[in-house]
Image (cartoon, rainbow, N blue to C red):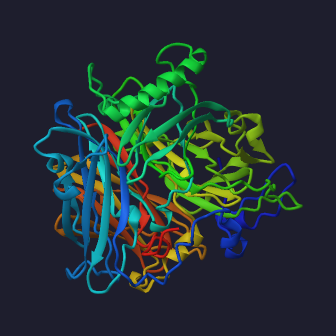
Amino acid sequence: MKACDRRKFLSLASRSATAFASLPLLPLDLFPTAAETTPVGQPLSYKDQPATERACWLDLCAPFIVEDAARGLHSEVVLTSDTFVGARGYADGRDATEYEFYLYDADGRAVGAAGAAARLKVSAMQTAVIPVRDLIAPHKSFWGGLTIRLRPVGRQPMHATDLFSSAFVRWQTDGSFDNVHANPDPVPWQTQSSFYYSMPFPPLSDYECTVGLFNPYEARSAGRLVMRDGAGGKLIEIPYELKPRASLLLALNEARFTGDACAAFGLSAPGSKASSNAARAGQVMRTHHEAVAGSLSSVGSPLTRGGGMLTITNDQGTAKSFAYLVIKKTGRDRFSVEHPLHQPVSKPLPSVAPFTAEGKFKAKNILFSPLLFRAKRVGAITLESRFHLSTGLPYEEALWFAPYAVGPDGSVAWNANDDAGLPPQLPAAQWERGAIRLGSEQSCVLDFSRLKLGAGFSGGLCLAVAPDSTHTFMKVEVRVPEWGAHAFTHFRPGLRAARAYQKPAQRGGLATDYVTSGASFERRGDRVFFDELIGVINIDDQGIEASPVLELFGRQGLVRQIALPPVPGFACRHFLLSDLLKEPLTVGRMSMRLIDERATLLMSTVHIDYARRDIALDHGSDRFSTFTDYHCGTRG
């Protein structure tokens, strides 16, 4: 497909009503105001106090922690300690973060003296790794949930600047691994209101999926888990109840509760003992199965071979819960992990088609991922991408998408409206006027191996959306066919969010300050055992050419600073760390930071483990992405 110059693309006249004129990057006056995008019934504003200059404890939740030495499954908690003042505030040792761990087994029992499994203080950008086996010693096996509390201490009072990049969980076996950030639990949302918690799940013909659900609160959590197919049809509805601090596991393919945490990672063993909490959940599930048994073709067969959407809604007056979804390759022990997102329960408004009188698509936001690959060779492996889009609980009864792809030179390399291969991938009702239209609680898959994008392409996928939506509902899947490996993550927010992140004075004036974690690098002689592929997309609406610097941080702090090649305006480029570091070097459990003084960039990474023949993804996060919103405010 011939690439179109991006500036020319922006100047295209509006098209007929059967098409749209895409707007890859939009002027800010086209974005809705906060009042237009805030759902009815949202708890008190995060900005209910002038609290950005106060220090306080904030909470994170990691809902599925597993350790089983006998079966070869190990977990770690990785801390970035990435709150500091200024562009280089990590350098003088004056800033640090205090962490507290509260670990609970599946029955809700606390691990550790006085209820805390660990307390520690980590200097800024000195990556800390805490093996779960050290937290549970002398025991050898565990599964349950973790609450992490954190508070910066340093040269000035302040709360954590980014809860999404403060702490990560890493799971690993001999053959697979993954890492995902702990989820923020904002103070105003620590209520007993009803929340809608959702994400898309991939085709169950390809994957076996298990939900690990954790109630981190002192109050009980009760509600319903619902699985829907891509068209929004209800496949099954399952009631659940969790006592305080307890966990449960739901195998999506068979819609049954289980107590074997290792089975979710492909390490099933007969005769494993379920927790008493899971047993009670199983009793509820067996009763439910008696009513729906006829809908299952055979024992163990999936409810659907396709993908769909999972929703978890807690009842009003009970606590919400947190979840990770373990996504295991069918018949193999390769796994990846992703998470849903909470929304306040609200009623969507009537849908308004986002087209002008001339048929021009009028986007409200653009979401980005720099992880689009089509038969892209990276060393000895090939990368392929699929994307799983869903509505969550939308602001309107339909959510519209106008996808397009950008390449390494900043041009538009692919446009959904020009690809005749896209409509056949979708139900007829999900393609209208040259755009994707998802009704409430619907989902779809974009498989670029079946679309008109040339082999060898690497770049970024951009989703123009209307009305506004949240990037977490849009999942990214990257596969390595030679290894049978896969990994999942999600999109990044748009330019309006990035501009807000740039405002705090504590940032030190940087236009880009992005962090990813879970990285490693190992080169011995000429052989690379662990590598990183770094995707950078320039979303700055001023067309500024970026001159980014990549910083690598290990346990002792800064390891390397690397000036990356320029990234043109609107471009997406990828950099292999082994091409940037030629000397023998081993750095385990590394955080990577991307900075630029002028241009607004996003970074996501592919972790490549040549020993395990597996990959993992990290979507990356701006170092100030929650500073203004998630602070020391009061409960709603």
Residue shown at 33% from the left, 74% from the top: 83
List x then y, in percent, for residue 183. 41, 56
Q: Is residue 305 placed above or below 222 in the rendered structure?
A: above
List x then y, in percent, for residue 142. 23, 40
For the image, the number of numbered tags is 0
Residue shown at 81% from the left, 48% from the top: 433
Q: Which residue is nearer to you in this view: 88 or 108?
A: 108
Q: Is residue 306 placed above or below 407 in the rendered structure?
A: above
Residue 349: which quarter of the image? bottom right
Mark yes or no: residue 235 visible.
Answer: yes
Residue shown at 46% from the left, 18% from the top: 300
Q: Which residue is nearer to you in this view: 7 or 57?
A: 57
List x then y, in percent, for residue 79. 27, 61
Mark yes or no: residue 459 visible.
Answer: no
**Does residue 400 appear left or right of residue 492 in this picture?**
right
Residue shown at 39% from the left, 44% from the top: 243
Q: Which residue is nearer to you in this view: 269 or 444?
A: 269
List x then y, in percent, for residue 497. 55, 70
Q: Is residue 304 placed above or below 119 in the rendered structure?
A: above
- The single residue placed furthest to the right in the displayed view is 357
**Does residue 437 appear left or right of residue 561 in this picture?**
right
